[in-house]
Amino acid sequence: AFSDDVTGLGVPDSDLRRAPVCSGPLPALKPSDRHTVLIQTDLMLTGEAPEPHPSPDQLQDRWDDTHVKLPCSTHNLFPTDRTTVQSRWDLIRKALSVPFSSAHDVKDAIMKYNTGQAKGWGFTALHVYCKRLQPSEAQQMFGELLPEMAQLALRAPRLLTQPIPLLRTQCCRSLTLSQEQVSCLLANAFFCTFPRRNSHRTEFSNYPDINFSRLFEGSSQSKQEKLKTLLWYFRRITQQRPTGLITYTRQCLQRLPSWSSSEKQFSKLRISCEGTIEEQGYGMLQVDFANRFVGGGVTGSGLVQEEIRFLINPELIAARLFTEALEDNECLIITGTEQFSRYSGYSDTYRWDGNHDDQMPRDEWQRRCTEIVAIDALHYRNFLEQFLPENMSRELNKAFCGFVRPGVQTENLSAIATGNWGCGAFGGDTRLKAVLQMMAAAEAERDLMYFTFGDADLLRDVHHIHTLITDTHATVGSVFRLLLQYYECVCKKTTRGKPQETLYCFLSERL
Ligand code: AR6
């Protein structure tokens, strides 16, 4: 029953589970060794806006290897000359309490406490942005928005009263913060106040950039659109303070599946060449096609799937403050971020497209039922590399790590909303990656919603191979063994470029 304009295949949409409908009850929100909760949980029960825990008069200030170094720490010192030091937070407070009337003033303020960077940082994008504002918009920006953002940044010692643990390599750990606390972190990131984060020669060399300095440089239209998107977020949250919570979880797997002996059957697939993960994948586990430094180039020059998601859901950007680069058996799960903006286009044609009013319901922890998982594919420069057994296993393990939820009942797991993971900037082959993701989803016992992003041929091919696999009751292990055979019999004999026999031809003949 194929027609030329078919846009979706596989099981009907209604066969796939979505949160919150499919979710089981959550345990009470409470802190533990592995879960730091930065708000007072008792207040949650009464439906009041979250308050920081502990209360501000009991502020805990920590300056060590295992916590975020906050700008408001008393240990954040600044050399005034060779012999004396000054509180850097005092300097920040003074610099951000002065009225701004131009982009130049914003730059001046930022430079007051970032003197070491004076030469390297450019502010062209911010200048251009401000110059293009209509008089009433400029009035809004300098008279309201920037002063409110500065005040929000300066509330750090009252909002962030508990040290924030770093989500370090190979440590499974969760952080739950209020959206308001996250907004304060982001306001500080905007004004580039985070100490020890401007040079890659510090203890944070294995962390993404958090200060927004690179956002302000350059003359591309992309930068203008990024600024519009992020400033819209700040406008929204300064006009009305958000009341929800967000959880950031670093998940590391110690025990990985034995792929060649897996007896798991493939799960259900719905595939569509229309729609996007974030829009049609609502309530599903939404895959972020990530960089190992989460957020990739969001504050710099990148503007593809991950960066766009971080722009429209800016609370994702806060993860860059505390998430060490991901290793092969790790992922980052972010639950509860809100979408503030719409966009059109992609990459160079990306444009901010106005306000988005997020309608996702909240769970018992007051988090939006939006679960995003950052998994970083390998970056391939040569087509054949990705068929190396160790590379296929690596991608399987990475995807599985992102998909599996130890301890959660299968019927409470939503479907996975994904697509051409690792196949854009990272140069992977969509057909191989689709099979690998199907295998990882099967192993994690979750269904898959695959968005081909406009590719109708891919829609048919992936649907066809999935049908063949399920009709023949092939197991994950048997498909893995066929992938290994494809490598041995076909890839190894190919010296350059792409093999003559495609993966799907090879699989079709042997399934
Ligand atoms: N929904 C569904 N599919 C999408 C969407 C969407 N919203 N956006 C893009 N695609 P890419 P990668 C499809 O290149 O190769 C970033 O800088 C579209 O077909 O973003 O894993 C990260 O920080 C697109 O070509 O992912 C990493 O550094 C394909 O998904 C790096 O890129 C791949 O999107 C990751 O690159």
Image (cartoon, rainbow, N blue to C red):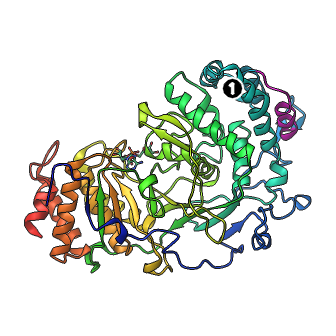
In this rendering, position of residue 323 left or right of residue 136: left
In the rendered view, would you say 99 is above or below 174?
above
Q: Is residue 496 magenta?
A: no
Q: Is residue 93 magenta?
A: yes
Residue 365, can we see it?
A: yes
Rendered residue at 43%/58% (across/down):
281
Q: Between residues 93 and 224, which one lies in front from this camera angle?
A: 224
In this rendering, position of residue 385 left or right of residue 501: right
Q: Which residue is mark 1?
A: 137
Screen quadrant of the C terminus: bottom left
The quarter holding residue 382 reads top left
Q: Between residues 304 and 364, which one lies in front from this camera angle?
A: 364
Residue 484, can we see it?
A: no
Give, as a three-letter code, the residue at label 1.
Answer: Glu
Label 1 beta carbon within 8 A of ligand 1 = no
Rendered residue at 61%/77% (across/down):
26
In the rendered view, would you say 115 is above or below 251?
above
Q: Between residues 453 and 319, which one lies in front from this camera angle?
A: 453
* Residue 403 percent location from the top left of the image: 43, 67
Rendered residue at 75%/74% (across/down):
45
The quarter holding residue 17 reads bottom left
**Label 1 crowd bin: few (<14), some (14–19), many (20+), radius 10 Å:** few
* Residue 441 percent location from the top left of the image: 35, 69
In the rendered view, would you say 386 is above or below 212?
below
Magenta stretch in the rendered image = 87-101
In this rendering, position of residue 20 left or right of residue 75: left
Rendered residue at 17%/59% (across/down):
487
In this rendering, position of residue 145 left or right of residue 26: right
* Residue 257 percent location from the top left of the image: 36, 74
Q: Secondary structure at mark 1?
A: helix
Screen quadrant of the N terminus: bottom left
